[in-house]
Amino acid sequence: MLHQPVDGFRWRSHEITRVEGFSDAVFGFAVTLLIVSLEVPHTSTELLETMRGFGAFIVTFVMLAGIWYGQHTFFRRYGLEDKITVFLNLALLFTVLFFVYPMKFLFGEILTDPMMKGKVATAHGLVPIVLPEHKPWIFVVFAVGFVAVFTVFALLYHHAYRQREALGLNEFEIWETQHSIRRMTLSIAVGIMYFGVAFMNSLPKQTRSEKRVVLAVAFVIILLFLGLMGAMVKMMRERRQVTKKWTAQQIDSDNPPE
């Protein structure tokens, strides 16, 4: 059943299915894992220590909310519940749960200690929070999670595109589906760039020549990131223009001149 268009795209589902209900429960559990502390701090020192992780909580919460909304929009637009869709959705949920802690740890360190050189007191004295040899692997784990999430979304939209005739997608909805596939592919490219960051952190930095190599690699990575961000902005503008044009055409067709 088709419903009134939202942003030009007709929704084919307005009811919460079992698949979405299970997904919401998983996302809720993932947010629970992000909570800085499961109990109220007993001292002001504990409170301030807890608040140190608030920035990482905000960033990871926003990322989880974005993933949830993207999944919500997909199911509302296409209303698919076949085996392929359920399998891909389960893969998405697994990825979210598996990488929620690495995301929180990475952003917690970046926001409080961008150079990742901080230390923590243990029974054996002060030890680095992030060992130098572990830093590349942290970025690899984040890159794998980032790429996995958007790969699943790209596969979901590709599956919906293959079902375009059965779903009765109109001209704009087909364009929007293809555009979503391109957006997800571009996001995958952004995730792959984090493998470059991991490679940069694995390079030796002892001699002057080695430091120059690291600086050159960092410069290339920054340029590639800027290029990808520019492409994303361009795609967003294109999408906004096409959506606006299609919406205006629909209004004109619904209200023909007398």
Image (cartoon, helix red, strand yellow):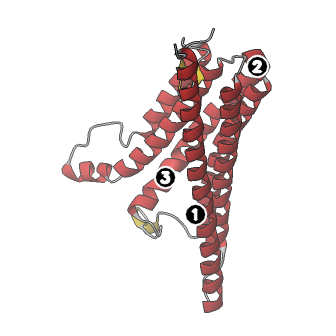
Chain-order first, disc 3 or disc 2: 2
Q: Residues within 10 Å of mark 2 (few under 14, many from 20)?
A: few
Q: Which mark is residue 226?
A: 1
Name the residue rendered at 56%, 45% in the picture: 236
Q: Earlier in the sequence, mark 2 or mark 1?
A: 2
In the image, what residue occupies the spot 45% across and 66% down?
Answer: 114
Q: Residue furthest front?
A: 258
Q: At x 56% / y 52%, what residue is drawn?
A: 233
In the figure, residue 162 lies in which quadrant? top right
Residue 218 image point, x, y percent: 60, 73
Above or below for 101 versus 38: below
Q: Residue furthest left?
A: 44
SS for tag 1? helix
Residue that carries the numbered disc 2 in the rendered image: 83
Kindly tell me whether residue 134 is visible in this rendering.
no
The single residue placed furthest to the top in the displayed view is: 1
Question: Which label lies toward us, 3 or 2?
Answer: 2
Out of 239 and 151, give the one closest to the viewer.
239
Question: Dots 3 and 1: beta carbons under 8 Å?
Answer: no
Mark 2 residue type: Lys
Amino acid type of the residue that numbered disc 3 sits on in the rendered structure:
Phe
The residue tagged with tag 3: helix, strand or loop? helix
